Amino acid sequence: MDPAGIFAHFGGLQPTEWLGYIAAAFVFATFSMKTMVPLRVVAISSNVLFIAYGYLHPAYPVLLLHLLLLPLNFWRLRQMLSLVRETEAANDGDLDMNWIRPFTTTRAMTPGEVLFRKGDPANEIVFIMSGSLRIPELDVAIPPGEVVGELGMLSPDKVRTQSAVCVDPGQILVITYDQVRQLFFQNPKFGYYFMQLSARRLFENMKRMQSEIEALRSGLRSEESRPTAP
């Protein structure tokens, strides 16, 4: 078709035919999008336009197809928005541990009990529901609501990097690394929380090491600046 014929074709289009072309343009736009929420919004818009086109033209196969696709896209959009909200909640550290109970083993701990020692094989994570722990190597107290043992999962040799000793009696939830791996993919909120938890613990350890190095350097400078006895 020559250019004049193309212009003549588009010039003679009816409003319902324009709906079809605009809807097709929206479908084309979805293929150029990199994020899912805008993609679903544009896809829903194209569904609405194709439904109007299929009804008014009429083109019943197109109408039926997009009547089926419209609720599917709404459902997927709702899932994505829910996932975004859950990720934001995990970013704020707000994670309800009640849903994780079916995947864990509940245990009581007593003062002085050693949950694990540095160098032990690492195969589980501990959620502190009540009571408290202490990390003797760092002399750090771990209050209720905290998690310990997650770095062992990321350790190349899968061993405990620190020890954990019970200070106050309480209750803990224990979950194996295999179950954590499954939950990581099944529940994005938990996966994002675990990623943040591990990163935070690593940065805390780095900050603590830097403070200790600075203290050692200050001590060495003090020793060097002291006058030597004749």
Image (tube, grey):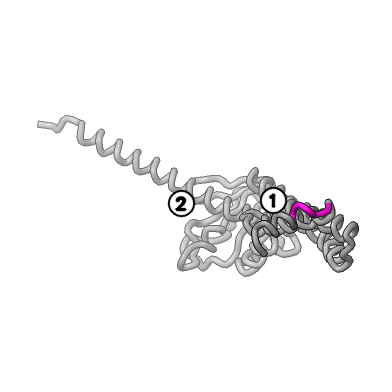
- Residue that carries the numbered disc 1 in the rendered image: 38
Numbered tag placed on residue 137 in the rendering: 2
The answer to whether residue 170 is seen in the rendering is no
In which quadrant will I find the N terminus? bottom right
The three-letter code of the residue at mark 1 reads Pro
* Residue 17 at x, y percent in the picture: 81, 56
Give the residue drawn at x 83%, y 51%: 15
Q: Which residues are magenta?
A: 10-14
Give the residue drawn at x 40%, y 46%: 209
Instruction: Single out the mark in the foreground, 1 or 2.
Output: 1
Give the residue drawn at x 63%, y 46%: 91
> How many neighbours does mark 2 have within 10 angstroms: few (below 14), some (14-19), or many (20 or more)?
few
Secondary structure at numbered mark 1: helix
Q: Is residue 229 above or below residue 104?
A: above
Secondary structure at numbered mark 2: loop
221 left or right of 18? left
230 left or right of 212? left
> How many neighbours does mark 1 have within 10 angstroms: few (below 14), some (14-19), or many (20 or more)?
few
The CA distance from mark 1 to mark 2 is 49 Å
Numbered tag placed on residue 192 in the rendering: none
